[in-house]
Image (cartoon, coloured by chain):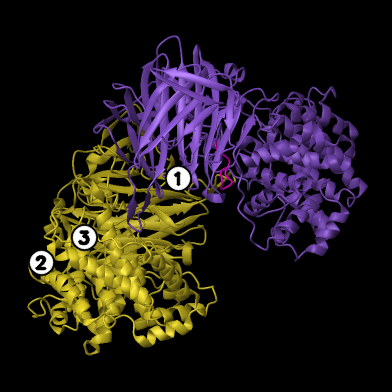
Chain colours: A yellow, B purple
Amino acid sequence: MLISAREAAEIRVSLGKYPAIDKSFNEARDYIDGVVRLKIDVPPPGEAGGYAHERHKQNYRDMQLAGMLFVITENDTYARFIRDMLFKYAEMYPGLGAHPLAHNQAPGKLFHQMLNETVWLVYTSMAYDCIYNWLKPEERKYIEENVFDQIIDWFIGPNAHEFDRIHNHGTWSVASIGLIGIALERDDLVEMALYGTDRSGKGGFLKQLDLLFSPDGYYMEGPYYIRYALRPFFIFAEALERNRPEIKIFEHRHKILKKAIYSALMTTFPNGVFPPINDASQTMDIRAAGPVFATTIGYFRYGVGDVNLLGVAKIQDQVLLNGAGLKLAQDMAKYDGDIPDFTWGSIEFSDGSDGEQGGLGILRTGQGLDQSMLLMKYGVHGEGHGHFDKLHFLFYDQGKEVIPDYGFARWINIEPKFGGRYLPENKSYAMQTIAHNTITVDQTTQNAFNRKEADAMSGKRHFFHIDNPDIQVMSARADDYYPGVKMQRTMFLVNEKRLPHPVIVDLYRINSKTAHLYDYPIHFNGQLITTNFEYTPDTTALMVLGNEFGYQHLWREAQADLQIENPSITWLNGNRYYTVLMNAKKGSKLFFTRIGANDPHFNLRSEPMFLLRIGAADHLFATVIEPHGYFNEAQEKSDGARPLLKEIEIIGHNDIATVVEIRGENEIFWQIIATNELSDPNAERTVRFNERSFSWTGDFNVLLEK
Amino acid sequence: MLISAREAAEIRVSLGKYPAIDKSFNEARDYIDGVVRLKIDVPPPGEAGGYAHERHKQNYRDMQLAGMLFVITENDTYARFIRDMLFKYAEMYPGLGAHPLAHNQAPGKLFHQMLNETVWLVYTSMAYDCIYNWLKPEERKYIEENVFDQIIDWFIGPNAHEFDRIHNHGTWSVASIGLIGIALERDDLVEMALYGTDRSGKGGFLKQLDLLFSPDGYYMEGPYYIRYALRPFFIFAEALERNRPEIKIFEHRHKILKKAIYSALMTTFPNGVFPPINDASQTMDIRAAGPVFATTIGYFRYGVGDVNLLGVAKIQDQVLLNGAGLKLAQDMAKYDGDIPDFTWGSIEFSDGSDGEQGGLGILRTGQGLDQSMLLMKYGVHGEGHGHFDKLHFLFYDQGKEVIPDYGFARWINIEPKFGGRYLPENKSYAMQTIAHNTITVDQTTQNAFNRKEADAMSGKRHFFHIDNPDIQVMSARADDYYPGVKMQRTMFLVNEKRLPHPVIVDLYRINSKTAHLYDYPIHFNGQLITTNFEYTPDTTALMVLGNEFGYQHLWREAQADLQIENPSITWLNGNRYYTVLMNAKKGSKLFFTRIGANDPHFNLRSEPMFLLRIGAADHLFATVIEPHGYFNEAQEKSDGARPLLKEIEIIGHNDIATVVEIRGENEIFWQIIATNELSDPNAERTVRFNERSFSWTGDFNVLLEK
């Protein structure tokens, strides 16, 4: 399925030569050698995250590893371990009914949700395939009748709707049935896995490949979920390629699986962590099982020689124990311990299965771990795990999120925190618009928090230009996420020789026929250092900022009635200062907040934010985000705690273009134009504001000198 | 002064052989080779932390490095650089008066405070000594008349009170005069440096050595300040040893300088960070200049062969460029890149120059970076930088402070934060008792925040036993820090085979003739996970916990009227859970708080705390702090989120002893006795509580089995 006798023989004679596969092999062997000495435990089903749940998860991982080791070493101990464990499952499984603790999910029998059971079957199929020929026919019969036939019936019988669903749960389900079909040499199951329970092609693996990814390979639920779905996609694809080569699965849809692994890896921060957009943790990274399987297989099938994939494998510090893993390890060994850190470039992904439903833009500058990364989100909602955050951005610098995404409100698998499941605050805060760095209108949430409505629309790509590495820009629209309100955000990432670090220029234009209150929020990581305006702090009592749509979770720490047009706020994070310089109308309001209100169980993290509130129908939020200076507490050094950029002036904005001018120390003067009308990189354009006329070609124009 | 011609020659022929000194030499040379190509800048005096201030600091560092390089390489470029810079100072210095921006401090001329100017003279003396023979007599005359004579007059004339002061400012002052005296071969200055301006011995270097350290070498201002004072102590001592060997400075007061460097290093956390007791940052570590000078010199004079010092030098990654540095580098090279992490053991330091003024206790368990460390503070107040925190403890685990000390309220050298100086919140919060992990009485501060009163008293050592590495214990008293209130704290660090990590047992006994409200606070780093009791959260408004003594900076986030006797609170930090299990009377109160109230400039950090409030005259706070379980968000693993210890019962406490019993899962039953009467490790003792009689020998007794 994943490893042939020839590959096993090659690995055997290669041991000791290639450190990456040696390490993975030795770790697996040392670990499994310990496991096989213990008593096998197949406990009755238990609650999510409890002992039995975790035991069954560990059991399938152990069986899969033992299977690979058996094929490679030909040592019967590993085969016996799998057989004996499957005998235990065979004793118990026929007596099980639907798990009683399912929460609005299709139930499994071993696990509270069927999803976990499909993962069990994916791994166990791999293990079973490894020992199939070693087993006696009567042993096979016993196991198949009491385990596999039962579980197959469960998946394609009462839970067929899950199987035919175009969703990561469906992917796991079809992959598990397809894999056990290959292991059992049951073509009917493989056909069903490929084309759906009715074999019509409306469901099944191929349809999932067609619908769950954009043509660029971007996964509509986002990076945190693709890292989970990579396993069924790549494991089943690899098994198909070996057993049903005529399908040419790795060619399917213009090599969509190549795009899938690359797009997953290319969304990551420079340290390999997936950006926590939509429901996601802030720490999931490329060392997870899915990216490891997919990197090894993807390298072999698509990427041989790609040094960035070697850099990924270096961080993963693990390869798959098959021929693909051997090839990867051989190529890693050529660098003799000196594989460069991977450096992904700027990239835009289209979203939606047709690629017409907006996208995700990533601007990067710098090399390896020193990269800065600006990400903007303007694609689909992403179904049940989607956040209401169109035109949200996040900024990564110094190896961390400086302007973060909160991620999900969940303490994953921590039993005392609501069983480790999603917390109520995931809906009441983390999914709401105000939890993100995008404008809220009238203190409500996009689509009024109606998921179906959100799923029915998408952001729109406007333009994305990265030819000049020093002036990169992306622009997108989100219309009618608030009825009658059109929003357009254009973000520049600018390297300028007089400034030590790349600077973000954010032009967020918003249009409506009627007046609204627009809140422009920046969630920041760090300690507030200074402002250039007076504010009124809430010193002896804190009140909540609002009553709903996430505002009820924000304490108001201070407020300002702005008397200046260019308010700026500076915070410190690590060794660097960050200043947000805004353009505001005199009399507009600014609030400092902190998460924590209406959080009776301390489920949320205490994090700061500020927002600029402006009442208007049409408005442009023009903002500069400048990293500057240096601070080192242990060395007691501080330089450049004040920003160099001092002023951002809005010259004008209309349906043709937006023009701003930025001034700073060292005689810095920038003029920045963003085209608002139809994107065309070659069009000659002119716009007039007041008495001034501006002409340029294409989608934008940046002058860094007068 | 610090390097002889012979040492220089040895280093020259050793280059390329010993990585540690190669690295320091190459870095210094590459850096200074860049500096000497630039225009020398000696600007007029400016404000603290501003350009001129930082320039003069960099100038003295550059001159000192250039001096060492000149002696080693004999390259005139370095000597010319120093001479030319001193010429610039000679042009400016005679025209300067007292700096106008001194804040309640003796002013310098180049710097706002004389302290910085003494540092300038210490470094510049070293540089001048290196080029003295190279200079022409008329050059010497010009520099000495216009710089050194002037500065000497300033220090021992109008600022003689600073010179004769027994304090780190005084140490810098006498060292600077002593060093320039040696450079200029002026015995009068060296005599004054040794014995005070009047040469009586009431002031001067030797008196500082006698009074500023306890007999164990513990520095009364604490670790953060000794790392600053190590430079004048060790640089002047080394210069004295080389020029006035008859003084036998390294033998003085039973080798007090050996004790000084060792005690400084032995207070550090396993990662080399100084514990932030008293005014201190949370990040100052052994890589600072003072520890680097003192480690090299101390290794050569006292510690040759001590592998722990090699481990220190490994973290410092720097040695002094002289014979001592060469020796250290040679010994480091013997380990061929594999120097073990240092592992300091448990240790108690006496405090006060007579060693009779309490102390500082540190219990440690584990090796290298995996050590856990429990520190209790029961010595002197420590003068102007002291905090009102007697019997305060902090706990370090997993490479960080888990139960932290807030440190100082200061954003050091960050100009927009009050010029980088101590903030008003340092007094209003950081110094107050409630900012620490020790009991407050009636919501006030020890000594009613009267520093003179605090300086006039001290904690009292009771006992300290570390013979059994699995049951370590320290006990101390603090009486009348609140009038009429006697406090005694006994802390155990227990390793028990049924528990995965060491556990703290804290028995804090408090006695008074009259009833008070006692607040027992635990500041914790991490996210609250769960409690075993009901509480009322403040969900829609936050109020301050009190009006003064630091309480005005605490938001109350929740409160509980306890209905159980063993409340427990669990939080998560990194990969580990921590549970504090307390003994409480039904009806006592518990508060959750967060720092941030009455902080109009966002000067404080937002950090959580909880406190148990009990009204009583005599009371025992009996508490267990248990690290447990494992969490890894990226791996989505969580085990053991609930503690194993469930109950702590107070059997009794009186002037003879305290007896508690602790129960937990896996049939854990511990009986713990702490002797309260006079310490005597050999005394046989008996105490009766209710109908039970307890007998033991010595200061404590711990039974871990029934």
Marks 1 and 3 belong to one chain: no
Q: Which chain carries label 1?
A: B
Sequence-wise, the earlier of marks 2 and 3 is: 2
* Amino acid, disc 1: Lys
Instruction: Decide which of B271, A659 is in the foreground and name it.
Output: B271
Instruction: Decide which of B347, B652 is in the foreground and name it.
Output: B652
Q: Residues within 10 Å of mark 2 (few under 14, many from 20)?
A: some
In the rendered view, does B107 fall on the left or right side of A185? right
Q: Residues within 10 Å of mark 1 (few under 14, many from 20)?
A: few
- Which quadrant is home to the N terminus of chain B? top right
Q: How crowded is mark 3: few (under 14 residues within 10 Å), some or many (20 or more)?
A: many
- Which quadrant is home to the C terminus of chain B? top left
| Helix, strand or loop at mark 3 | strand
Q: Quadrant of residue A220?
A: bottom left
User: Mark 2 sits on what residue?
Assistant: A159
Q: What stretch is highlighted in magenta?
A: B269-276
Q: In which quarter of the image is residue B337?
A: bottom right
Instruction: Tell me how far mark 1 sits from mark 3, CA to CA.
Output: 60 Å
Q: Which chain carries label 3?
A: A
In the rendered view, does B265 fall on the left or right side of A695? right
Q: Which residue is drawn at 84% across and 35% down?
A: B149
Residue A237's x, y, as percent?
26, 79
Instruction: Decide which of B75, A69 is in the foreground and name it.
Output: A69
User: Mark 1 sits on what residue?
Assistant: B497
| Helix, strand or loop at mark 2 | loop
User: Mark 3 sits on what residue?
Assistant: A478
| Helix, strand or loop at mark 1 | loop
Q: Are marks 2 and 3 in contact (CB under 8 Å)?
A: no
* Amino acid, disc 2: Asn
Residue B575's x, y, as percent?
40, 50
